[in-house]
């Protein structure tokens, strides 16, 4: 009986030991499962956070690009408007001017518009890109050339008006001036060269202008060629080039819809 009781005790102890081991193993497996679940949760949380961060960054970048595009669009539009204001004012105001004083006043007013155009051109050059900046410089140059032509034509009209006004009191002198102007115009390019043929004509014109009470500076206005050189850029062409370059630059900055 005692041996059976001993065997039972040993068996009970063995069962208890096995139970303890099983419990420990289950606990470790449960802990490992919890750790794995925790790591999976952390990875999911990190992925969610990164996705949210990427979305915020993408949104921020998109908003910055849109803001940048808006700044450039405003700069391009302001420059183009200043160019058109400058050239249109020169065309309209100078055509209405008649006398020399009125013409000079209009030309002085144009200097303010020219300065505004130049300032806006610098903004475009700073904003870029290079293609738009180059097109803006070409447009600015052609606009200035066009306005110079308008100014010279206005000066000539004003000078002719001044000359016409002297016809009532100095008809002979005015008639002779009309005869000498074409000669002075044809010989003007030779001034200062070995083939200079303008001396006699200009000397007589100065005498006639003094007799008529006309400013001597009008001789230059009436006789000097004022047309732009053949290599000058046409205004309409450079306007189209600038608009095309500006449109392409703005379209390239549009946010993707994909």
Image (spheres, rainbow, N blue to C red):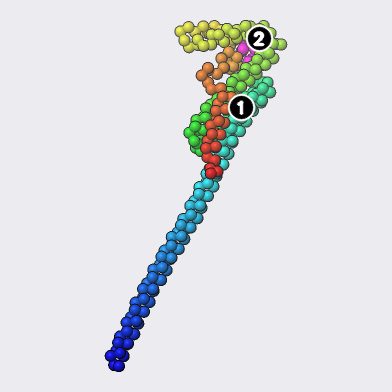
Q: Residue at x 41, y 68 (%)?
A: 33
Q: Residue furthest right?
A: 168
- The relative height of residue 244 versus residue 189 in the rendered view (above or below) is below
Magenta run includes residue 247: no
Q: Is residue 122 visible?
A: no
Q: Residue at x 68, y 23 (%)?
A: 96
Alpha-carbon span between mark 2 and mark 1 = 34 Å
Occupied quadrant, residue 246? top right
Q: Residue at x 61, y 27 (%)?
A: 87
Numbered label attached to residue 87: 1
- Numbered range of the magenta stretch: 208-214
Q: Which dot marks residue 173? A: none
Residue 209: say if magenta: yes
Q: Is residue 102 left or right of residue 227?
A: right
Dot 1, how many residues are within 10 Å of its Cα: few (below 14), some (14-19), or many (20+)?
A: many
User: Is 214 situated above or below 136?
Assistant: above
The residue under the point 30% across, 90% down is 4
Could you tell me residue 30's position as x and y percent?
Answer: 41, 71
Which residue in the protein does label 2 denote? 174
């Amino acid at each position: 009986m005692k041996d059976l009781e001993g065997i039972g005790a040993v068996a009970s102890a063995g069962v208890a030991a096995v139970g303890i081991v099983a419990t420990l193993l289950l606990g470790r497996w449960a802990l490992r499962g919890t750790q794995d679940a925790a790591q999976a949760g952390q990875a999911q949380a990190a992925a969610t956070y990164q996705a949210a961060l990427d979305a915020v960054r993408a949104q921020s970048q998109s908003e910055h690009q849109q803001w940048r595009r808006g700044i450039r669009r405003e700069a391009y539009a302001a420059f183009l408007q200043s160019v058109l204001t400058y050239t249109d004012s020169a065309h309209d105001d100078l055509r209405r001017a008649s006398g020399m004083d009125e013409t000079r006043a209009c030309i002085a007013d144009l200097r303010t518009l020219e300065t505004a155009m130049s300032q806006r051109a610098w903004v475009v050059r700073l904003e870029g890109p290079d293609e738009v900046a180059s097109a803006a410089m070409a447009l600015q140059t052609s606009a200035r050339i066009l306005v110079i032509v308008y100014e010279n034509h206005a000066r000539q009209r004003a000078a002719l008006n001044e000359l016409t006004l002297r016809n009532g009191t100095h008809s002979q002198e005015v008639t002779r001036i009309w005869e000498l102007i074409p000669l002075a115009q044809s010989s003007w390019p030779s001034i200062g060269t070995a083939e200079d043929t303008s001396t006699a004509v200009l000397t007589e014109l100065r005498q006639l202008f003094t007799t008529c009470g006309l400013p001597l500076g009008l001789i230059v206005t009436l006789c000097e060629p004022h047309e732009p050189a053949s290599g000058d850029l046409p205004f309409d062409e450079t306007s189209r080039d600038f608009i095309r370059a500006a449109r392409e630059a703005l379209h390239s900055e549009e946010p993707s819809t994909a």
